[in-house]
Image: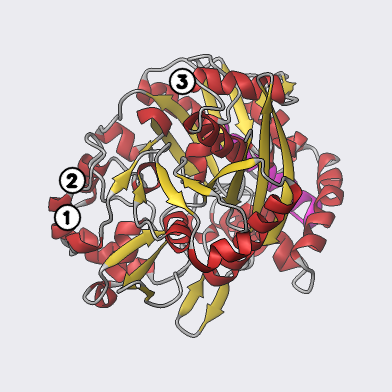
Amino acid sequence: MSAVAAVDLGATSGRVIVGRFADGVLHTRHIARFPNEPVRTPDGLHWNVLELYRAVIEGLAAAQRQAPGEIAGVGIDSWAVDYGLLRRDRLLGTPYHYRDERTAHGVASVHARIGAAELYARNGVQHLPFNTVFQLAADRDLLEIADRMLLIPDLLGYWLTGTAVAERTNASTTGLLDARTREWDHELAAIVGVPDRILPPLVDPGTRLGPVTGPAAEVVGRPLELIAVGSHDTASAVVGVPSTRPDTAYISCGTWGLVGLELERPIITEQARLAGFTNEGGVDGRIRFLHNVMGLWLLSESLRHWEPAATAEQRSALLPELLDAAAAVDPATVAIFDVDDERFLPPGDIPGRIRAWCAEHGETAPAGRAETVRSIVESLAQAFADTVQRACEVADHEVAVIHLVGGGSQNRMLCQSTADRSGRPVVAGPVEATAIGNLLVQARTLGILSGGLDALRAVVARSERLVRYEPRRPL
């Protein structure tokens, strides 16, 4: 067997991709793609996790049909921080979406027990109001009856195999891991009111979790083994960055823009905290020293506001036309707004919020869709450039080139503007860096590939077409 399957779940869509390896080159095939639309009920915003699970199983079954007898393993990655609570193997309600408004109460509850600076000194995690530790505080009533918490990819893996674990790269985003030991911080959990019993055993990427069993196996068909990968999608995306140079910064750009460096050790200083950097786990024990930037959510949610009756596919089809119109707008004439302002986090009228931000800060608000899109792209590029520069300063680390991977690598305007505003070349691609990183870790675990991260990344560089954007005169 020379093929593996990646289940890559993003905040707006999921996909199943099969990878085959031949002569040191990775060949990928998209098997299934499905929407991931949240559902609002009277008690808040939720993930439709049961529909996701159904789509995953059907996608794996399709993969088995298209590559009979070839697929040896499957790995699951997804967004971070969200979870399901279980009691006696039963899910206690539908998992909340991290954009649900309930998290504000959780932040206040945690900070009443431990200050922000002390919390960062223990977990090294950037303050975001939806971090798992804050969500669990908001779910305190359910914690009294729950006996297990599973992050989204671990929950799906549990349903597939019956193995209940927490993969370490994703667990590092919860705010409950010790930033230095990368083990559960049981003392911190007690301080914030999280019972030890709900924290599952930790495993590293590359751990074999067992075969798909039960009802799922009947649908999937041939035997398939689940392998832990960098189950936080950014951890897998960083594996898929096609560079072995130490002077590289990465931007994993999709719904969010994750901007940072790969380091050997965490940087847990007050300077890092105030600059908004997180120290999350990477594959092979690396540290993802990064900052979360709002990302392409600003574009997708603006399109949703402008075209509320359109489907996700129809809105995606409209984006190229909008980007072409935005390309005719002089970038020097549009407002550069703070994309990290928390007003842009919830779903809703993003263009109206941009106008409100501009009014409050004495900026000329964009008029019309083309100017709004150009303002979003330029503001994102400026945030990316500023974040790379701050990372260099805080980590005392030189960066000569920026690798931009994920869906944002297809946005030529964003890539060129990031190069211009940072004064550094931007290498764009691969688009599916997350799925590729997932596939690479599986292949190494199964003996299809060997070597460290440099060897895996060399496979990506040989396999993918990359586009380089040189900086022009800075704006």
Residue sitting at 22 percent across and 45 percent down? 117
Residue sitting at 66 percent across and 62 percent down? 58
Relative to 102, residue 172 above or below: above
Residue 373 inside the magenta-drawn segment: yes
Q: Main secondary structure of the magenta part?
A: helix
Relative to 13, residue 94 above or below: below
Residue 77 inside the magenta-drawn segment: no
**Mark 1 — residue?**
114
Q: Are marks 3 and 1 in contact (CB under 8 Å)?
A: no
Identity of the amino acid at label 3? Gly
Residue 301, numbered label: none
**Mark 2 — residue?**
118
Q: Position of residue 193 (x, y in %)?
A: 18, 64
Q: Are marks 2 and 1 in contact (CB under 8 Å)?
A: yes
Q: Residues within 10 Å of mark 1 (few under 14, many from 20)?
A: some
Residue sitting at 55 percent across and 39 percent down? 438
- Is residue 30 visible to the viewer in this orientation of the structure? yes
For label 2, the SS is helix
Q: Residues within 10 Å of mark 2 (few under 14, many from 20)?
A: few
Identity of the amino acid at label 2? Glu
Mark 3 or 2: in front is 3
Q: Position of residue 52 (x, y in %)?
A: 58, 65
CA–CA distance between discs 3 and 1? 39 Å
For label 3, the SS is loop
**Mark 3 — residue?**
452
- Is residue 365 visible to the viewer in this orientation of the structure? no
Q: Please tell me in which quadrant of the rendered image residue 352 appears.
A: bottom right
Sequence order check: which comes first, mark 3 or mark 1?
A: 1
For label 1, the SS is loop
Span shown in magenta: 365-385
